[in-house]
Amino acid sequence: NLLEAYRDLALDVIERKTGRNEEIDYSKIDKYLHKATYLDEDVIYIDEMELPRHFLHYESATLIDLFCFILYELENELEQETDERVKDLAHRFKEQHLTHDQSLFDEETFDTTITALKDSLDDIDKVTAYKDEDYWRLYEAIESFLYGELDMQNTHEDGIFWGINNFWSIWEDMCNTYVFTKWASEVVYADTNIVFNGEAVANDTFGGYKIFKQKNFKNPFYIQFRHEKRWMRPDLVRIVGDDDKTFADCIKIINIKEHSFTLDFTVVPLSKDNMEEYKTFCRNLKVMIKNKNLSSRVISKNNFKNYPKNVLEQVKNEKAYVKNIAYSQISDWKYMIESDFVQKSKKIDDDINKQICYEWCLEKYGNGKRFVKSQFVIPSYNNKCKDIGDDIENKLLYSRLQENRISVFKANFQLIQEVYLNHD
């Protein structure tokens, strides 16, 4: 709010503004003859002129100094250049109202500094008689910065806290960083410009926004009307289920007992997405027993006894392509909580509508014959979990999510955070 207010309101406009003034500048009377009242004996009467006047007195000027002090501290912390005039007014405020060591971002003094700024703002508001639109723009920006937000869900409490309400943008960067770290080859589209391995990943521009797009992927996310395209931007599109994957990439062998040349083991899928490969792998193991007349036995559908190690390795290294296993996945990063997706709300309905539009565009213009899956990805806080996460059980979700087969995936925040903080 402070930065926006500064962009919108030039300091010279704040301090000095043209307005109606009862003083008369006789050198400019000729410019006001058409507004004059004509009296007898060629006398004209002009009651006011549009002349520059100071409409903010000392108290309101102190509001500008307070605004500039916070702005200077903020820009200094963000390592941004500060206008010399802002710097001068900030120093003037500090000299008059603070000690030399007080600062908003000093670990030792920030608490007392904020208290002093709140007192100054309150004093300014009490003694300022004339408050126009610009005054309130500055006042509200300062107030929002100093007091944070009120928790309207707990109005019986003080509800004043420090914090930020736009962590969603950081969450999106975290998710994109994780995906480009783990599955970069599967990403065909991403609405991001994160710096990855020292370079910005964005390589194309649509609708004025920088995005990442694989060269052979034709961007299908638009609505066209009268030859004009309105571009949409899903967060991420992956092609999951690579034809070059082997079964070793999709299943896990759990050793039960090892012999010289054979093995007793159980087969499990690596994840829920690998169920088709898992079933095919177990079926292929059984086919090999029959074709090669092996002495191995199948204890259950995924449990094998005395299976030759060399044959097991042969089957594991086979291509894991299963018809229709490759699918397109559209992911939307949501910094929300699980309960937000249980009941109907306008935001969830709007998000579902957008997701349906993305699916339609992908199926119509850029998908080929792949099946399309949609998911909302939310953070999950479970320090004991070492996996990336899992879907919320479908029957617990809001009915429209179920009807449109949109899953809600609880992603392991700690795991994603570790990758985000440690990537190049």
Image (cartoon, rainbow, N blue to C red):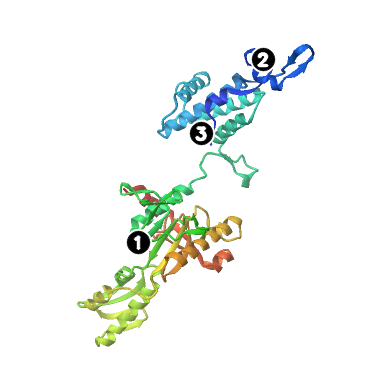
Q: In this view, does 61 lie to the left or right of 42?
A: left
Q: How far apart are marks 2 and 3 (CA)?
A: 34 Å
First of labels 1, 2 by sequence position:
2
Q: Quadrant of residue 281?
A: bottom left
Q: Vertical placement of 109 versus 207: above or below?
A: above
- The amino acid beneath tag 1 is Asn
Q: In this view, does 107 lie to the left or right of 136?
A: left
Q: In which quarter of the image is residue 250?
A: bottom left
The mark found on residue 24 in the picture is: 2
Image location (x, y in percent) of residue 46: 71, 17
Q: Nearer the viewer, mark 1 or mark 2?
A: 2
Q: Is residue 312 left or right of residue 76?
A: left
Q: Is residue 354 left or right of residue 83?
A: right
* Residue to which mark 3 is pinned: 7
Q: Residues within 10 Å of mark 1 (few under 14, many from 20)?
A: few
Q: Vertical placement of 281 versus 132: above or below?
A: below
Q: Nearer the viewer, mark 2 or mark 3?
A: 2
Image location (x, y in percent) of residue 182: 34, 58
Q: How far apart are marks 1 and 3 (CA)?
A: 41 Å
* Residue to which mark 1 is pinned: 216
Q: Vertical placement of 105 versus 415: above or below?
A: above
